[in-house]
Image (spheres, coloured by chain):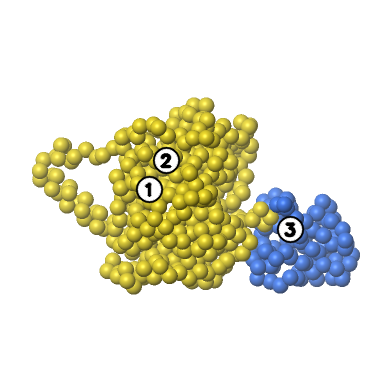
C-alpha cells in the first residue's frame, strides 16, 4: 500500500483523515499512484492534475523521502521506502500568494 | 474587477457623467389605444392584468416552492453568500431583522456562486474553486446543511479554438472556473454553468456531468477577450415564458441570446457604446458587459450594467439605449429588478474602472422607479463616509416577499438587507471574507 498525505483542503473535500492508503498494481509511479487515488476518491479528480492532459496543477507538489518528485517523469518509479510503505508520498499545496 | 487595459480618461479624478445633462432616452410603450379599437384595447388590458397576476404568483411559488396563498408571515428567507474564503448561509423570518449565520462552508475555498433551485429550494448548487486545487461543484439536498461533491469535468466541445488575449494575440480556450450557476426553472436536476474561459455548460443530472453548448462560442468567439477579471460568462437569464430563449453576458464579449434552446446564439449588443474600451465603439462583440437583469413577467425588457453605462432594451436585446440618467457614476457591477415592480431597478454606482469604490466614500444604492433615467439615492443605514468597498456583479439579489427585500454584499465582507424595497438598510453581517455573490431564497 502507498501512503499518501493530503493537504487539508483535499482532506475535507475527500472526507478523509490526514493520511490515505491506496493499492497500486505493478511498479508504483506518480501517475499510477494518482490514478489509484482518484479511483478511490473520485472527488479528487481535477484537483491535483488536469482532467484531460493529466499534467500536475501548477501549485501542486509531490515530496517524498526528502526529495521533490514534482518534476520527475510521471512514470518514474517511486522511491523504495514509499513503495514499501515506510515513507509517505506527500501532496503539498505550494506556498504562494505572499 | 473587470476593466480593460485601455482605461477611460475619466478613470481617475472625476466621474464620467458629472455635469452632463441627464438623458431622457428611455422609452415608454406607445399607448395601445393608438393602434387598436376600444374592444381590442379592453381585451388586451384584461390579458395584461391576468398575465401580470400569473407572473407574480409564479415568482413567489417558483422561488419559494410554496402555494400562491402563502402568507408572508409564515415565510423565511435564506441568503446564500459566496466569499473568497467559503460560503455562508444567512436565515431569517419574514421580518428580516434577526438573523442566524451558518458557515463557513468549504472554508478557505473561493465560492464564486451558490444558488438554489426554484423547483426544489432544498437543492442548492455551489461553485467551489481554488488557485491550487481547481474547480469543484458541490450539491446540497437539504438546504445547505450537508453537501456532496458533484462532477467537475468541464470539457469544451469539439475543436477548442482560440480567442483574443490582452495583447491581441490568439490563445486557446482554457477552462479555469465556474463563475455562475443557474438552476433550471422547471427541473431541479438541470443547471447551467457559466465558466471562464467563457462558455456555457449544462448538466441534466444534478451536476454529475456537464456538456457544453458550443454554439455560443460560434458567435464570433475568436474576437472575445478577457477583462481584468478574466474572460468569464457571468450572467445567465432564463425565460420562463419561452424555454428556448436564454440570455447570457460575457466580459469582455457582450450579451448574447439564443431562441432555440442554446443551439445557436447571436450577439445582442446594438446600441452599446464603448469608446474608451474598443477601437470600434459600436463593435458587434467585445463590450464589457458586467451584468444583466430582467423581471420574469417581461422577458423582452432587459437591464444592463455595462463597464460604463446603465442600459435598457425593450426588444429582447435587439437594441439598447442608455438610462444612466442622474447617476453620480454609471460604472458599476450589479443590476437588479424589484420582485413585484418590473420598472423598479437597482444599481450601485462605483467611481471608476480604476477606483473600485463608491463615489465620495458613500455607499449608495440607486433606485429607479421608471425603468432607468431617474434615479434616487438610497442611503438610510448605509455608511456615508469613508466607505471604500466594492459590490461585485453577482452580489445583489431580491426576495419575493410582499415587501420586497433587497440584499447586497461587499468586498469588505458586509451583507446588507433592506426589507422595504431599499428605503432602509441594515447590515446582517459585518466581517465576512470579501463577498463574491449573494442569492436569496424565499421559503414557505
Image mark count: 3
Give B82 or A89, whichever is nearer the viewer. B82
Q: Does residue B435 lie above or below B73 as drawn?
A: above
Residue B194, image x, y percentages = 51, 50
Q: Residue at x 51, y 39 (%)?
A: B352
Q: Residue at x 58, y 41 (%)?
A: B228
Q: Are callouts 3 and 1 both on one chain?
A: no
Colour of chain A, in one word, is blue
Q: Which chain is yellow?
A: B
Q: Dot 3 lies on which element?
A: strand
Q: Are marks 3 and 1 in contact (CB under 8 Å)?
A: no
Which residue is farthest right? A80
Q: Residue at x 49, y 56 (%)?
A: B409
Q: Are marks 1 and 2 in contact (CB under 8 Å)?
A: yes
Q: Which residue is mark 3?
A: A93
* Residue B398, quarter of picture: bottom left
Could you tell me which quadrant the C terminus of chain B lies in? bottom left
* Label 1 neighbour load within 10 Å: few <14, some 14-19, many 20+: some
Q: Which residue is mark 1?
A: B377
Q: Dot 2 lies on which element?
A: loop
Q: Which residue is mark 2?
A: B328
* Residue B223, quarter of picture: top right
Could you tell me which quadrant the N terminus of chain B lies in? top right
Residue B177, image x, y percentages = 59, 51
Which residue is farthest front? B385
Q: Which marked residue is nearer to the observer: mark 3 or mark 2?
A: 2
Amino acid at each position: 500500500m502507498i501512503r499518501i498525505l493530503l493537504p487539508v483542503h483535499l482532506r475535507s473535500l475527500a472526507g478523509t483523515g490526514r493520511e490515505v492508503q491506496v493499492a497500486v498494481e505493478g511498479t508504483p509511479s506518480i501517475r499510477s499512484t494518482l490514478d489509484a487515488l482518484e479511483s478511490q476518491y473520485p472527488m479528487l479528480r481535477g484537483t491535483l492534475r488536469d482532467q484531460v492532459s493529466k499534467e500536475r496543477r501548477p501549485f501542486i507538489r509531490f515530496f517524498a523521502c526528502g526529495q521533490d518528485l514534482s518534476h520527475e517523469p510521471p512514470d518514474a518509479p517511486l522511491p523504495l521506502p514509499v513503495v514499501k510503505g515506510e515513507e509517505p508520498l506527500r501532496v503539498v499545496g505550494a506556498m504562494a500568494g505572499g | 474587477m473587470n476593466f480593460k487595459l485601455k482605461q477611460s480618461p475619466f478613470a481617475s479624478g472625476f466621474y464620467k457623467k458629472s455635469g452632463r445633462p441627464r438623458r431622457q432616452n428611455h422609452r415608454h410603450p406607445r399607448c395601445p389605444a393608438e393602434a387598436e379599437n376600444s374592444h381590442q384595447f379592453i381585451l388586451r388590458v384584461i390579458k395584461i392584468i391576468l398575465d401580470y397576476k400569473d407572473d407574480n404568483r409564479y415568482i413567489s411559488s417558483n422561488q419559494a416552492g410554496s402555494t400562491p396563498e402563502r402568507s408572508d408571515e409564515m415565510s423565511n428567507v435564506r441568503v446564500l453568500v459566496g466569499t473568497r474564503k467559503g460560503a455562508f448561509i444567512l436565515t431569517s423570518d419574514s421580518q428580516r431583522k434577526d438573523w442566524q449565520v451558518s458557515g463557513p462552508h468549504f472554508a478557505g475555498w473561493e465560492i464564486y456562486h451558490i444558488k438554489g433551485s426554484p423547483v426544489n429550494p432544498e437543492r442548492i448548487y455551489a461553485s467551489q474553486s481554488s488557485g491550487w486545487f481547481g474547480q469543484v461543484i458541490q450539491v446540497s439536498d437539504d438546504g445547505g446543511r450537508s453537501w456532496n461533491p458533484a462532477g467537475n469535468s468541464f470539457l469544451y466541445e469539439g475543436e477548442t479554438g482560440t480567442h483574443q488575449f490582452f495583447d491581441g494575440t490568439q490563445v486557446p480556450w482554457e477552462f479555469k472556473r465556474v463563475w455562475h450557476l443557474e438552476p433550471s426553472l422547471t427541473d431541479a436536476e438541470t443547471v447551467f454553468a457559466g465558466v471562464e474561459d467563457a462558455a456555457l455548460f449544462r448538466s441534466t443530472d444534478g451536476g454529475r456531468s456537464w456538456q457544453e453548448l458550443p454554439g455560443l462560442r460560434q458567435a464570433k468567439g475568436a474576437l472575445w477577450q478577457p477583462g481584468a477579471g478574466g474572460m468569464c460568462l457571468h450572467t445567465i437569464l432564463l425565460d420562463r415564458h419561452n424555454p428556448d430563449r436564454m440570455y447570457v453576458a460575457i466580459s469582455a464579449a457582450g450579451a448574447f441570446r439564443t431562441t432555440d434552446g442554446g443551439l445557436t446564439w447571436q450577439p445582442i449588443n446594438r446600441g452599446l457604446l464603448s469608446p474608451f474600451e474598443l477601437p470600434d465603439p459600436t463593435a458587434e462583440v467585445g463590450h464589457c458587459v458586467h451584468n444583466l437583469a430582467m423581471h420574469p413577467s417581461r422577458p423582452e425588457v432587459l437591464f444592463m450594467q455595462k463597464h460604463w453605462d446603465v442600459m435598457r432594451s425593450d426588444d429582447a436585446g435587439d437594441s439598447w439605449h442608455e438610462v444612466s440618467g442622474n447617476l453620480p457614476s454609471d460604472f458599476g457591477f450589479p443590476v437588479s429588478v424589484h420582485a413585484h415592480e418590473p420598472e423598479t431597478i437597482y444599481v450601485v454606482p462605483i467611481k471608476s474602472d480604476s477606483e473600485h469604490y463608491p463615489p465620495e466614500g458613500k455607499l449608495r444604492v440607486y433606485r429607479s422607479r421608471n425603468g432607468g433615467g431617474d434615479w434616487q439615492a438610497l442611503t438610510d443605514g448605509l455608511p456615508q463616509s469613508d466607505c471604500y468597498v466594492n459590490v461585485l456583479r453577482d452580489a445583489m439579489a431580491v426576495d419575493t416577499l410582499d415587501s420586497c427585500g433587497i440584499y447586497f454584499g461587499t468586498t469588505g465582507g458586509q451583507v446588507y438587507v433592506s426589507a422595504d424595497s431599499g428605503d432602509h438598510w441594515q447590515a446582517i453581517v459585518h466581517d465576512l471574507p470579501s463577498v463574491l455573490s449573494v442569492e436569496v431564497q424565499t421559503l414557505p
